[in-house]
Image: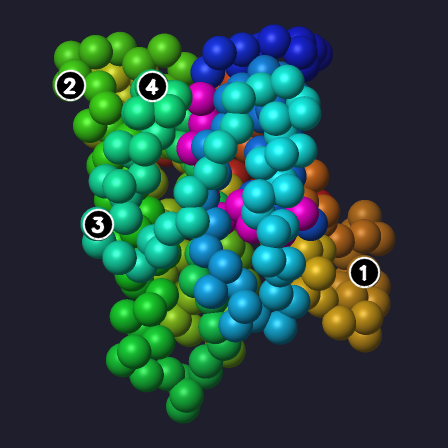
Amino acid sequence: MMNWQPNMLQGQTAVITGVSRKIGIGAAIARALAEVGCNIFTTYFRPYDATMPWGSQKNEALEIIEELQKMGVKAAGLELDLSQPTSPAKLFAVVKEQFGQANILVNNAAYSTSENIQALTNQSLDNHYAVNVRGMALLCQQFVQQFDEETWVENGRIINLSSGQSFSPMPDELGYIASKGAVEAFSLSLSAALARQGITVNAIDPGITDTGWIPDDLRQTFVAQAPMKRIGTPEDAARLVRFLASPEAGWITGQLIRSRGGL
């Protein structure tokens, strides 16, 4: 039986991208790791949030950090445009200065807009690639470069957020699904490269998750289709990430783990 001790990740540091909304998956992951003693460094990018229909409040990302600090862990964050090639190096330089080495990386931030094949453009494809693929890959690189190649990394973890594109068709989100398919392929091969250092690499598919984007009529449709008669919550995804970040998951790597409640 899993026994979550309050100090299970005491003194360890997790970098979590895309933590800008209190009801988002990123915030839930940050809380779940903080609950077991993990220090947290977040990224957020309010200009992107402002373009989304659900948006976020101006100070919401900072309020999340304050909430984490009140949980008794060290927490800080940085507003960062992950579509810029220099952002991953900048992030880890700040993390090193403020926290030292991070041993957990959660690539949660994503760029997502809806386009079918008729609406797809080169710019949309580039926008998805810049954050979801290049940004993710360079963040992994910067994480790994913290350590000597011969060093065993105690509880080294990379956890990448994917989606359901290999589970069921998403014909109106072609740029997004193409980039998330690359995340899964990258995670598998990276896991083989880093296994000898004790760093695990996994991807998760949290399924349909209610983070404020689902209209009521669509939510009712999803619930009606769901075997468990509900859709996912950010906390469902966060509990899986916490498990993969824990010492108990040290033998699990190279996996795409679906947490979809059968939907």
Q: Specify which label sits upstream in the sequence, 1 or 2.
A: 2
The residue that disc 3 covers is 86
Q: How many marks?
A: 4
Q: Specify which label sits upstream in the sequence, 4 or 1.
A: 4
Evaluate whether residue 66 shows in this view.
yes
User: Which dot marks residue 140?
Assistant: none
Q: Specify which label sits upstream in the sequence, 2 or 4.
A: 4
Three-letter amino acid code at disc 2?
A: Glu
Q: Give the range drawn in magenta.
A: 13-22
Between circles 2 and 4, the one closer to the viewer is: 4
- What percent of the width, then of the height, locates residue 93? 26, 32
The residue that disc 1 covers is 223
Three-letter amino acid code at disc 1?
A: Val
| Mark 1 secondary-structure assignment | helix
Question: Whole-Å distance between the Cαs marked 1 and 2?
Answer: 47 Å
Evaluate whether residue 182 shows in this view.
no
Question: Whole-Å distance between the Cαs marked 2 and 4?
Answer: 18 Å
Q: Does the magenta stretch include residue 157?
A: no
Q: Specify which label sits upstream in the sequence, 3 or 1.
A: 3
The residue that disc 2 covers is 149
Image position of 226 with respect to 35: above or below: below
User: Which dot marks residue 100?
Assistant: 4
